[in-house]
Image: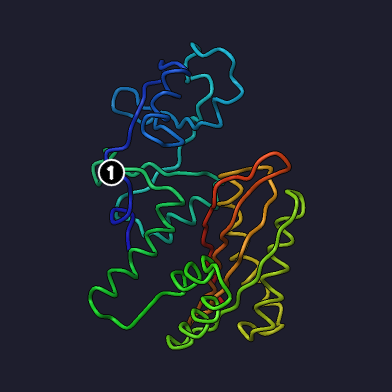
Amino acid sequence: MIVKDIMSKSPITVTPDATVIEAEKLMSLNKIGRLIVVEDDKIVGIISSSDLVVEQDVNAPIEKFMTKEVVMVREDTSVQEAARQLTDNNIGCLPVLDENGKLVGIITANDIVYGYLKTEENARAMEKKTITPESSAIYLAMTRSREYEEYWLEKIKGYGYKGAITQTGASAEKLPIKLRESTTVAAIARGVISETTKEKMAVSNAVKDAYSQLALINPGLGGGFKIAVVRGDSHISVAIFGRFGHALVDGPEQLTVGTSVI
């Protein structure tokens, strides 16, 4: 699967001299969280809703707040490489360029997650008896009853995978550690991994990959999550599903996926 298959096409852009209020209106009307900033057909920045939250002057130009160092990918880049770029650079989106360097799309962490689901749906349509570890982890994490948990745990065995599921919640400071510890313990208990350092590190890295995406969406918040870990032939996949929140409000449900070679 490549970026072109799952990216959002015809991304909405804005110029550097657009005001804060103009950018906020564009995001609100189009139900998006970021805009690509373009000047003279050249990408010069990225502006997100979080960049504008602290600004009191609604008529200030967004050029003052936008991120100017923009990481981009080509449309023929693999989805795995795009996910790695998001994680390694701690960013929420990637503008997508064609072979001529023209802006043709944008890809986010959510696009990648649902791209994995799309891949499995396509496989079903073609009557292929296969499912990816990533898709298995997503479905397992999103189960809402004990019966469906057991159903999916048994189902993935039929594909030659091993899986486990657990739940945890913690404050913002402790959440990364709690996610890693809970997932590792569950993976060992269900026989997904052994207790060797190498295999425990593989789970830890996959959790870190998925958590970094959550932290980009809602930085500084704790929450409660269901975590699924699935082992394929050569890698571990982790899906985290649940809500960020704090004492005053619960956030929307979030879903992210992380992978690691084992």
Looking at the figure, which quarter contains the C terminus?
bottom right
Compared with 32, 241 (above or below) is below
Q: Quadrant of residue 80?
A: bottom left
Which one is nearer the viewer's eye here, 220 or 42?
220
Q: Residue at x 61, y 23 (%)?
A: 54
Which one is nearer the viewer's eye here, 131 or 92?
131
Q: Quadrant of residue 52?
A: top right
| Model colouring | rainbow
Q: Residue at x 51, y 14 (%)?
A: 58
Which one is nearer the viewer's eye here, 231 or 90?
231
Identify residue type, mark 1: Lys
Label 1: state its secondary structure.
strand
**Residue 247 left/right relative to 26:** right
Compared with 194, 142 (above or below) is above
Q: Position of residue 242 (x, y in %)?
A: 59, 57
Crowd class of label 1 (few under 14; some 14 to 19; many from 20; radius 10 Å): some
Q: Position of residue 89 (x, y in %)?
A: 54, 47
Q: Residue at x 70, y 39 (%)?
A: 248
Looking at the figure, which quarter contains the N terminus?
bottom left
Q: Residue at x 57, y 61 (%)?
A: 240
Q: Which residue is mark 1?
A: 9
**Residue 2 left/right relative to 137:** left
**Residue 64 left/right relative to 31:** right
Q: Position of residue 122 (x, y in %)?
A: 27, 69
Q: Position of residue 260 (x, y in %)?
A: 55, 69
